[in-house]
């Protein structure tokens, strides 16, 4: 059940405040006003129920459908992760989702 306050609607709750911040950045980049409530409240878990301390993503009610779609795309990316690759310059093994070598900065082949 989604909550609303005024013209704002809660569109997502997530345990990780770093991911909440990433979602906030993605929404802002698309021009969607976003507010993260409880960003720093996670430290209170134990004193208050854990779900009450998790960060909540709130957006304008009119933007809620597209915000939910974007959040889904962030959390459930389409397609498989590319295979790991070996840097042609330094020989370092790099995970497939990275386009540059972390060690020397070379671009993936």
Image (cartoon, helix red, strand yellow):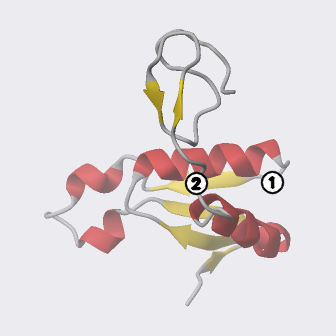
Percent of width and height locating residue 41: 33, 53
| Residue linked to disc 1 | 32
Is 67 left or right of 82, judged from the image as shown? right
Label 2 CA crowd tier, 10 Å (few <14, some 14–19, many 20+): few
Residue 14 drawn above or below residue 26: below
**Image quarter in which the N terminus is found:** bottom right
Q: Which residue is mark 2?
A: 81
Q: Secondary structure at mark 2?
A: loop
Q: From this view, report whether residue 34 is shown above or below residue 59.
A: above
* Residue 39 picture location, percent across and down: 43, 49
Query: Residue, x 22% and y 55% (percent of image)?
Result: 44
Residue 7 seen: no
Towards the viewer: 27 or 53: 27
Seen at 42% across and 49% down, the residue is: 17
Which image quadrant is residue 22 in? top right
Q: How far apart are the alpha carbons under marks 1 and 2?
A: 28 Å
């Amino acid at each position: 059940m989604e909550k609303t306050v005024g013209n704002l609607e809660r569109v997502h709750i997530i345990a990780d405040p770093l991911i909440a911040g990433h979602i906030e950045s993605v929404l802002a980049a698309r021009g969607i006003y976003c507010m993260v409530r409880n960003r720093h409240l996670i430290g209170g878990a134990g004193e208050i129920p854990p779900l009450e301390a998790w960060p909540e993503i709130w957006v304008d009610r009119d933007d809620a459908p597209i915000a939910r779609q974007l959040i889904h795309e962030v959390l459930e990316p389409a397609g498989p992760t590319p295979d790991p690759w070996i840097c042609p310059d330094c020989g370092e093994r790099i995970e497939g989702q990275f386009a540059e070598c972390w060690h020397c900065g070379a671009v993936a082949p």
